[in-house]
Each structure stands twice: as C-alpha cells, then as structure tokens.
Amino acid sequence: MTSRERVMTALGHREGDRPPIDLSGHRSSGIAAIAYARLRDYLGLPKKPIRVYDVVQQLAVVDDDVLDRFRVDTIELGRGFAQDDESWIPWTLPDGTPCYVPAWTRIERDANRWLIRSKSGTVLAHMPDGTLYFEQTHFPFLKGDDHPEKIHATLEECMWTAVASPPGPIDDAALRQGAKRLRERSDRAIIGLFGGNLFEIGNFLYRNDQFMMLLAAEPKRAHRFLDKLVEIHMQNLERFLGTVGDCIDIILFGDDLGMQTGPIMSPAMYREFFKGRHQLLWKRAKELANVKVMLHCCGGVRELLGDLIEAGLDAINPVQISCVGMNAAELKAEFGKDITFWGAGCDTGNLLGNGTPETIAEHVKKQIEILRPGGGFVFQQVHNILANVPPENITAMLDAAGNAG
C-alpha cells in the first residue's frame, strides 16, 4: 500500500495496513526549527541547512530523510517549490542555530526585536528577544475603516496573509509546473493549503475582541464583510484548484473556532454567520477537483462538529484532546462514522514536552487503539511540535505510530 493509498483509505473510513502518519504535511502538523535541528542531530543524520518555511511559527522544512525515517505518508504542496539556494537567505534562530528563511520575507532587526513588514512598509509582526515566535501587531480594521471594497487590498497588510511560505510569489504556470513535478516524484498524499478562513480573517483584520463584538452587535455589517470575503475566497478557490486540483488529494481550509473550555461561539452564531458560507466553499472545492476537504480548527469544538459535518467537512485537525468535550473515545463513538479525525495522536500541550519516551509511546498506542478502528483516522500530534520538545520524545511518538500494525 502506498502512502497516498493509505491516507485515502483512512479518509474513506476503511482501515489500511497501518495508521497513516502526518508530519509537516500542513502548517499545524509541523515541527519548530529549533526542535528539528536537535532531532536531526539525535538521529545521527547528515548536516543539512535548516530551512524555516513558516517564519511566523518558526516551522522547519522536514527533509526527505526524516520523512522516510518515520514512515510519513503526507507532504505539503509547497514542498515542490523553492528547491534552489537562491530562494533562501541566512538568518539565526532564537537559540543561535543558523538557518535560512524564504528570500521574499521582509524581516529586519530593530533594537531588541525582529520585525516583519508588509510590501508597503507597515510593521505587521514582531518577535522580541527572548521569545520564539512572531506575534501580530497590526490590525488594519481596528479603527473601523472596513469598506468591503478595501478587504482584498487590506489582506496584504495582515501578518498571516502577507507572509508567504513556499511556493511563494510565483505565477500560475510555475505553480502548475511545480505541482505536477511533486505529484510525479512522490507517492505521499499531497495537501494543498488554501486557507479560506472566515472567522479568523475577521480576527486578523479587526482584532479578536472587536470582531466578536461586531458579530454580536452589528450583524448586518458582519454579514456584509463576510459576503465580500467569501466572494474573494471563491475567486481564489477557482484559480487555485483550476491550477493544481488534479495534483493534490486534500485541500486544507482554516478557522479556529474553539478554546480550551469549548467553542468560541455558540452553535447558533456559527449557523448564522459561518455554516452556510463554509458549505458554499467546501461544496465548490469538491465540484472543482477530486479532493477531500479538511479544516484546521483548534480548541474544543465538539458542539460544532455536527454542523461542520453537515456543511460538507471530511476531516478535522488537530483534534485537541486536552480541551473540554474533546475526549477521543467519545468523539469517535459519536462522530467517527462521519468525519476523519486527523490528529489526537499525542497530547503536545501536557505530555510530549514533559513526559518520558515510555509514557509517550504508551499514550500514542492508546490513542491509536481508540481512533483507528473502522478508519477515519490519520495520526498527527495535537498541533506543532514546539521548540522545547526533546528529540527522544519526538522519536518515541513517531516510532510508536509507525510501528502500529
């Protein structure tokens, strides 16, 4: 069974020869560059340049030798691009480790911090000394200047939408060519990162508190904003899948809808503002290409899962099992026939960084025993492997998953 077959079998709610494994197949199943450098040393692998493709989260490009070592079954579409040295410029990680970042990243030093700027020169994010990640500093609609016709241009003034990871700033022809090359050389399931965020774009542009007040107090204005956003996403979706739709297996959307204690919003608010719009985008994606739709959605979202399934969702990650209502066995029993749990394989927040290799391996085995029966499960740790995680714990986790028959 090839990796692609293994993943698609799981998405079809059937069991394959072993659970499929995702590591760095998308930007929430990756590994911090600091931890990745230590992992390579621990495994005794040859020295290679550490490439940080996601500068905001400080995520490393995971090289083929590591993917092979841990029997990883997925790969992100961006891995087909930026293969040349000219696409990267030297930088230094917060712990002093030399690395490279995409050449098109507008990153600069300012006194005791690093900055990221937009094309226009606006400071979008900063990383003060002593921290490990960039945080957003600029919210374009914070002062209320949110006319719908300004939304498209304003997306370039937002940290998450302006800082491009590979493939970077290329035209459709180059995107098509790179996607075809990746499809031809890899039998891993290919994930195309689309985004299509609705609730989160509101947070990025207005700031979280202001956008929540907008939804609650000015629904007409919120609907106007979201209608325009869907129009923009739909145009981008047509273009994206028209270019690479036959080269990818899964298209990834994003919208964090949960907190540690449960959903950020009520099911009623989700239904009013987001369910129908998600349904439009996800249905169109399946009309345009033979793809499965996955949503990155952090937090406790059990109360929203029924609506997400009705809207057409095939898979959800990272399945944050430490949150209220996100018990893996209960989720599997209630929703396992209707959705694929892409995650929940290892608790990163409480265990992966603090446990022993033995306790981690036992935890992983238990999670797989719960989630694998009947398919509908892809192994992924709960969100990214953070900088403080010891390499022996990472190895224990991934070896336990890879050895699960």
Image: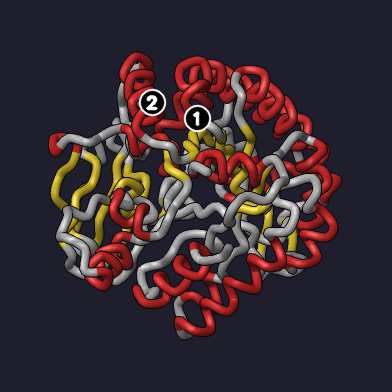
Q: Is residue 143 visible to the viewer in this orientation of the structure?
A: no
Q: Residue at x 51, y 21 (%)?
A: 246
Does 196 sit above or below residue 255? above
Q: Which residue is mark 2?
A: 179
Q: Which of the 4 image quarters holds residue 321? A: bottom right
For the rendered model, the colour scheme is secondary structure
Looking at the rendered structure, the kind of residue marked 1 is Ile
Q: Which of the 4 image quarters holds residue 392? A: bottom left
Front residue of this view, candidates 133 and 194: 194
Q: Earlier in the sequence, mark 1 or mark 2?
A: 2
Q: Residue at x 39, y 74 (%)?
A: 389
Say which element carries label 2.
Answer: helix
Q: Residue at x 51, y 33 (%)?
A: 194
Crowding near pointer 2: few (<14 within 10 Å), some, many (20+)?
Answer: many
Q: Which residue is mark 1?
A: 248
Front residue of this view, candidates 71 and 304: 71
Looking at the rendered structure, the kind of residue marked 2 is Ala
Crowding near pointer 1: few (<14 within 10 Å), some, many (20+)?
Answer: many
Does 355 sit above or below residue 298? below
Q: Is residue 209 left or right of residue 374?
A: left
- In the rendered image, residue 151, in percent from the top left (x then y), is placed at 53, 26
User: How much space separates mark 1 and mark 2, taking CA atoms?
Assistant: 8 Å
Q: Which of the 4 image quarters holds residue 103? A: top left
Front residue of this view, candidates 233 and 166: 166
Which corner quadrant holds the C terminus? bottom right
Report the label total: 2
Does 276 sit above or below residue 64? above
- In the rendered image, residue 24, in percent from the top left (x then y), is placed at 42, 51
Q: Is residue 1 left or right of residue 58?
A: right
